[in-house]
Image (cartoon, rainbow, N blue to C red):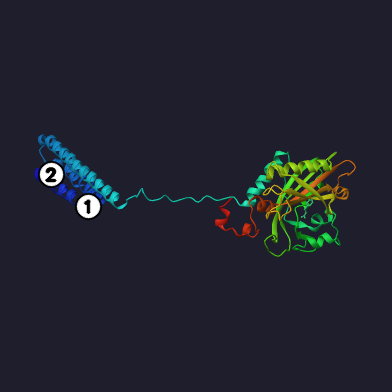
Amino acid sequence: MKERLQRIREEAIEKIKASKNPEALNDVRVSVLGKKGELTALLKSMKEIAPEERPAFGQLVNDTRAEIERVMEDAKKQMEQMLLEMKLKTEVIDVTLPAKKNSVGHRHPNTIALEEVERIFIGMGYEVIEGPEVEYDLYNFEKLNIPANHPAKDEQDTFYINKEIVLRTQTSPVQARTMEKGKLPIRMISPGRVFRSDEVDATHSPSFHQIEGLVIDKNITFADLKGTLEEFAKELFGEDTKTKFRPHHFPFTEPSAEVDVSCFKCGGKGCRFCKGSGWIEILGCGMVHPHVLEMCGIDPEEYTGFAFGVGLERIALLKYEIDDMRLLYENDIRFLRQF
Ligand code: DAH
């Protein structure tokens, strides 16, 4: 029996030393120490020895078991250490390598300009309202005092979905939609995309953006319109900016005007930027036509109001001194990064 124990011990230690990986070590554990292992089998055959010798032999088996376990534990530790060293050698991290950069996006100049305009009007108590880009002819033209045979309809030729539905040529239909809702007073701006069948050049695009403005309340006068737009121009282009209202015609406002601002580049002396005139045109505006109020369910005897329309691209081009509108649509990252 003792020889058998001795042999198991020696063979186990030999096998442990020969093990090249944790799996091999585990095989040894199972075959020697496991439930059906050699040591267990040996314990089971204890009855073959004399009863008085059994305790001493049992002790010997336990000692052997403990020894094999210890040798196995050492071998395991060594193996892990080796594996770790191998890993450290092969998986080198070069901390001097430049880090991977997350490229963060950038707001488009149109967006920057729009957010600036929104900030100014929200500051004056305006709401921001959106309207549909695919619009009824009724809202885009009829309710804005532009009947079927009106010459203004030619100027704003667009893309027709069918006889009644068009891609809106202006953000002005949102005026009619807002007034029709019947919640008064109104103080809103409405930014959005508009469409015209225009050829592409440095100042035209078949799709661009406008920001509409509308105020309806009791006792609103042209003075309110002037004051509001003067304040807007100052906030947008600088405290020294002057505004000039030139009489103009829009079918849905009466009286109507176009607004110029003093050239913020030369201060009004005249330069290349303002083509020598000292003034730059920025928007159209006027007092909402009584007939438009009526068509939208508002009593013109009780309420008056003003409206304005700004080209968003025009503001972005002016503010950032960009001389070709096409640059805004090309999405060239080298261009966009500059703002
Ligand atoms: N919708 C006009 C256009 O596209 C711009 C405009 C002019 C809007 C006068 C207005 C306004 O609200 O009062 O040419």
Q: Residues within 10 Å of mark 1 (few under 14, many from 20)?
A: few
Tell me which amino acid carries mark 2: Leu
Viewer-proximal residue, 74 or 167? 167
Q: How many marks?
A: 2
Ligand 1 within 8 Å, label 1 CB:
no
Q: Position of residue 191 (x, y in %)?
A: 71, 50
Q: Quadrant of residue 51?
A: top left
> Residue drawn at (60%, 60%), measured in percent from left and top?
330
Q: Is residue 34 visible?
A: no
Q: CA distance from mark 1 to mark 2?
A: 25 Å
Query: Is 294 positioned to the left or the right of 4 in the image?
Result: right
> Residue drawn at (19%, 48%), measured in percent from left and top?
16
Residue behind mark 2: 5
SS type, badge 2: helix
Q: Earlier in the sequence, mark 1 or mark 2?
A: 2
Q: Quadrant of residue 237?
A: top right
Residue behind mark 1: 20
Q: Are marks 1 and 2 in contact (CB under 8 Å)?
A: no
